[in-house]
Image (spheres, grey):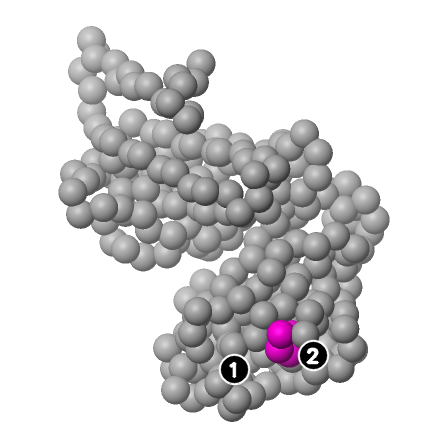
Amino acid sequence: MTDVSDYNDATTNILYTSDAKFINTGTDGNISSIYSNTVQRPLSTVRSFSHGDKNCYTLVPEQGKNNKYLIRASFMYGNYDSKDQLPVFKLYLGVEEWDVVKFNNNFDIVFKEIIHIPSTDYINVCLVNNGSGTPFISALELRQLNNSIYKTQSGSLMLYRRYDVGSTTNQIIRYEDDVYDRIWKPFSWTYWVPISASYTSDLLSANEYKPPPTVMTNGTPFLKFYWLPNDPSQQFYVYLHFAEVQDLGSDQLRKFDIFLNGDPLD
């Protein structure tokens, strides 16, 4: 997030460009050298907003309105202001509050991700000062999705968690493994016995959601996952991806049950 030339990230090969053409407020900065050598380049710089209660980016996707987009805002404080004071601020999508941004420590990396269908040809992503420190941002990314996936009854879909279940590498998966550049975090327990395919094939992700083959090659024979919503009125959508990773005989069939809050799903 600085006024620099375009570059391709060394890890993902994704092209990043300066944010100067999308906003005309804020101040460029760099995180402390203590942290900059340990993170990807997009997280090593910030744009901070010490003036004004609300500062907004204006994104104008080529595909225009009524299409589905993944929007991801990334934040790493990294003591860029040499104050050692972790800020707390709000993130807005247009006039609607998206989420609150807060950190556990100087090197904490926070991702906020939402799937959104704009009704106009532009998208406003805003940082709002709530009196608890100067808002800033490290990177802002926009990806077009297939309009047939992640359907909701109404509104935008904010990411809660996305896991690579049974990961044997403990590595984050994203582009180029994921064509939509979704971020998959490894999720496993020491007492699990992971199941892994002896091969990697695009057939493992041959559906409209296109989960990465590297994610679909691993699994676990047992999973119990739970969470406590901060707001009881929140509605959650759960997306489960399955692929057979073992060679079954012609007379064999894998079958299992899925339960939601103790009740079996049809």
Q: x, y (%) of residue 18? A: 65, 75
**Which one is nearer the viewer's eye here, 231 or 70?**
231
Residue 163 among magenta residues: no
Q: Quadrant of residue 105?
A: bottom left
Q: x, y (%) of residue 55? A: 75, 71
Residue 22 seen anywhere in this rendered image of the structure: no
Near mark 1 (Cα within 10 A), the count class, few <14, some 14-19 or many ≥20, is some
Residue drawn at (51%, 52%) of the image: 181
Judging by the rendered image, the residue that carries numbered circle 2 is 49
The kind of residue on which mark 1 rests is Gln
Q: x, y (%) of residue 196? A: 22, 38
* Residue projecting furthest to the top: 251
Q: Main secondary structure of the magenta part?
A: loop
- Magenta region: 132-136
Near mark 2 (Cα within 10 A), the count class, few <14, some 14-19 or many ≥20, is many
Work out whether mark 2 precedes mark 1 in sequence or the reverse, and give the earlier one: 2
Residue drawn at (49%, 69%) of the image: 103
Image quarter in which the C terminus is found: top left
**253 over 82 or under it: above or below:** above
**Which one is nearer the viewer's eye here, 98 or 58?**
98
User: Is 113 on the left-hand or right-hand side of 37?
Assistant: right
**78 over 162 or under it: above or below:** below
The kind of residue on which mark 2 rests is Phe
